[in-house]
Amino acid sequence: MFGDMMGMMGKLKETQQKVEETKQRLNTVLIDEKSTDNAIKVTITANRTIKSIEIDESILNDKEQLEDYLIITLNKAIEKATQVNETELAAAAKDGLPNIPGMDSLFK
């Protein structure tokens, strides 16, 4: 019994390490998003860190439009990054966990 427990603890440590490695790797996964007319382009990491924002000069004089475009485009990029992040972290966690009945439903 203790052998199984020690094996599980080792497996959990491995899983934790895999999750941490995945988090670090996600810092290098870039997500690009553009506004519908390409006036704004943002790039963020899969960990949701903004890397760049490009703004077309044509909308610099319209503060309200610029704000709206930024909000919409950033939110779309964050949504995509969140999906990538959650999928990758769930896969890393699921691969390392011992086969415990009922746990599969937690990572779907």
Image (spheres, grey):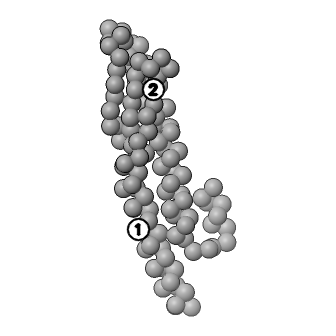
Q: CA distance from mark 2 to mark 1?
A: 34 Å
Image quarter for residue 52? top left
Q: Is residue 48 visible?
A: no
Find the residue positioned furthest to the top.
61
In the displayed structure, 69 sits above or below 33; it is above
x then y, percent, for residue 106: 61, 60
x then y, percent, for residue 61: 32, 8
- Which residue is at 49% across, 76% downward? 11
Q: Quadrant of the C terminus?
A: bottom right
**Within 10 Å of the Cα at label 2, are there few (<14), some (14-19), or many (20+) other Cα atoms?**
many
Q: Is residue 50 left or right of residue 81?
A: left
Q: Is residue 105 left or right of residue 46?
A: right
Which structural element holds mark 2?
strand
x then y, percent, for residue 2: 52, 90
Indicate which disc residue 34 carries: 2
**Which comes before the other along the chain, label 2 or label 1?**
1
Front-lying residue, 29 or 90: 29
- Which residue is at 41% across, 46% downward? 29
Which amino acid does the dot numbered 2 rest on?
Answer: Lys
